[in-house]
Amino acid sequence: MNLIMKKQIITLAGAPGSGKSSTADKLAKELNYQRFSSGDFMRKIALDMSISLNELSTLAETDTSIDEKIDAEVQKAREMNNAVIDSRLAYHWIPESFKVYLSLPANIAKERILSNLKTNKLRQESEGISNVEEIYKKITHRMESEKKRYKELYNIDHTDKNNFDLVIDTNENNLNKVVETILKEYENWQNKKD
């Protein structure tokens, strides 16, 4: 029997706008853990290339080096201890982590993303969008692009909730409740004997 040794790492994945960054920030603060975001890393790549995040996502469909660069950073994060990692594929690259998926319908996500864009300079620059309908189109395109790429590259569906230890609907739970639930379930997971 092959047992995976649990790591003191929480990996967060989920729908765009579901609150991954806010949740990861609050969890890291509560636990006094390190923090890593592959989304922030991807935004920096887009800015360095002087293209939008969606353009980078489309480019990544034919240029596998983009995903390879991002995935290499996530795999490096596997060596961290006491960490919260916000990344769509961290659950895959760090299977010994506590894997959390934040769920949110796309029509609600678009309002949240627009609100976040107004206060986050890096996101404003990398997204290059300013109205709700354009955001909805971009969200849908990015999700389809990622699903296609990850299926082709790794034969995985990063939206399959069966891959996660905990799934939370962030539309029905505010940030404090989401964090409280994750902390409780993370403690239970740590104490559970496999």
Image (spheres, helix red, strand yellow):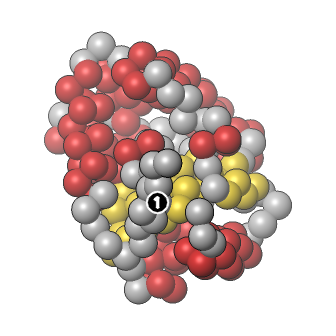
Residue at the spot 28% in from the left edge and 67% down from the top edge: 80
Q: Callout 1: helix, strand or loop?
A: loop
Camera-side residue: 129 or 173? 173
Q: Position of residue 160 (x, y in %)?
A: 64, 35
Residue at the spot 42% in from the left edge and 72% down from the top edge: 8
Residue furthest left in the image: 48
> Viewed as shown, does residue 135 lie left or right of 24?
right
Residue at the spot 42% in from the left edge and 62% down from the top edge: 5
Q: Is residue 133 above or below residue 179?
A: above
Q: Position of residue 16 (x, y in %)?
A: 57, 44
Camera-side residue: 186 or 38? 186
Camera-side residue: 160 or 14? 160
Q: Is residue 147 above or below residue 21?
A: above
- Confirm whether residue 88 shows in the render: yes
- Confirm whether residue 179 shows in the render: no
Badge 1: how crowded within 10 Å, few (<14), some, or many (20+)?
many
Q: Is residue 150 above or below residue 14?
A: above
Q: Quadrant of residue 182?
A: bottom right
Q: Position of residue 81 (x, y in %)?
A: 32, 72
> Viewed as shown, does residue 120 lie left or right of 106?
left
Q: Quadrant of residue 121?
A: bottom left
Disc 1 target residue? 97
Residue at the spot 37% in from the left edge and 57% down from the top edge: 37
Camera-side residue: 81 or 191? 191
Q: Position of residue 111 (x, y in %)?
A: 67, 49
Residue furthest top in the image: 62
Three-letter amino acid code at the position of disc 1: Ser
